[in-house]
Image (spheres, coloured by chain):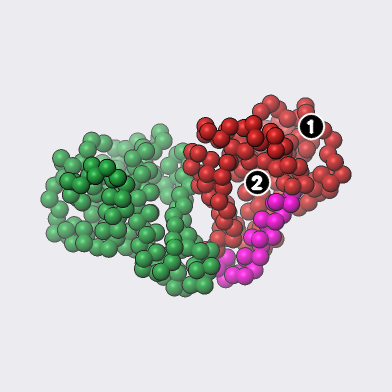
Chain colours: A red, B green
Amino acid sequence: MKDAAAAVAAPSPADTAALETSFIRSLVRQIRAHDTTGMWDQKPDTALLAPFVLTREQRRQIPIIADPDAKVLWRLEQFYDAVALLISDEAGVIATPMLQLSREGYGRVVVIAGMLVVLSRQLRDVHRFGFDTLTHLAAEGEGLVAAGVAAVNRHPEVALA
Amino acid sequence: MKDAAAAVAAPSPADTAALETSFIRSLVRQIRAHDTTGMWDQKPDTALLAPFVLTREQRRQIPIIADPDAKVLWRLEQFYDAVALLISDEAGVIATPMLQLSREGYGRVVVIAGMLVVLSRQLRDVHRFGFDTLTHLAAEGEGLVAAGVAAVNRHPEVALA
């Protein structure tokens, strides 16, 4: 995929609102934490997030035969790192993600706090990881965070073990 | 490492007892389950287990710079698969292992039952994964199984969630 910065369109009103959600802010913070040389300082958040957004048609065009691209795996990690970070903030625990992927793009991700699995998802077609819009990205992230926080609240003594 | 079958010495009395532990029997069952062509039918258990046993000196000679050998990763997986299998049997849950390794041989392994992390270990120098004797292998495995079963018993409602 080419550098997305040049191609970023102005976000829709819904996407503009999505940019202000705590999930997208956490994701952007997570991504920028990797920018130790300041190379992305001039890049707007929308440019950093652009590769997370793929239309259905774009997804369909990505082959799922070879190993997933290193960049898509990096984005997958950033996404679940952001989920874990926000669960940590909101539930007052230390939550960390663990990813286990097969070469074929199948796998499992869990977020763990103490001895509690606060989130567990099967992954497939990791090659095509992406969201229709920023609004979908925010909604999916917020949903996972809410589920994780609820799990902590059901078993706080296990999450703090 | 060359095929260990030719070089296997008769086990010591302690190791003979270790071969009868439920952990080693579970590990052997686990290993033989991969032998779909019957190639190992004639191999005694001691031959299959021989690569799990490394003297201190042998371990020291394995470089920890390059990626861990595929065979050592396979043995690591078999070991934790056997741990998870035995926890499942003894605690009446469905426990599965998850391994996350960096290229440098560091990582983390967890065994998960339901929403409970029944076991969590940091791994390092995975390149050198091995045990002084079969007795040590059995003791380490049984210890992990006992810890996992105890964790299930502390939080059965989470392990069955």
**Mark 2: few/some/many CA within 10 Å (<14, 14-19, 20+):** many
Left-right relation of B53 to A16: left
- Which stretch did the figure color magenta? A138-160
Left-right relation of B16 to B30: left
Q: Quadrant of residue A6?
A: top right
* Residue assigned mark 1: A8
The reply to whether residue B56 is in sight is no
Left-right relation of B97 to A80: left
Measure how far apart labels 2 and 1 are at the Cα level: 20 Å
Q: Residue at x 62, y 70 (%)?
A: A154
Hey, which residue is sitting farthest right in the picture?
A: A13
x and y percent of residue A161 in the render?
53, 67
Three-letter code for the amino acid on which mark 1 is drawn:
Val
x and y percent of residue B151 in the render?
45, 68
Magenta segment main secondary structure = helix
Asked which secondary structure carries label 2, the reply is helix
Q: Which mark is residue A151?
A: none
Asked which secondary structure carries label 1, the reply is loop
Q: Is residue A103 above or below residue B87?
A: above
Q: Which mark is residue A79?
A: 2
x and y percent of residue B61 in the render?
29, 37
**Mark 1: few/some/many CA within 10 Å (<14, 14-19, 20+):** some
Indicate the quadrant containing the N terminus of chain A: top left, top right, bottom left or bottom right. Answer: top right
Three-letter code for the amino acid on which mark 2 is drawn:
Phe
Please state which of residues B155 and A57 is positioned toward the viewer in this rendering: A57
Would residue A139 be counted in the magenta stretch? yes
* Chain bearing mark 1: A
The reply to whether residue A138 is in sight is yes
Please state which of residues B86 and A158 is positioned toward the viewer in this rendering: B86
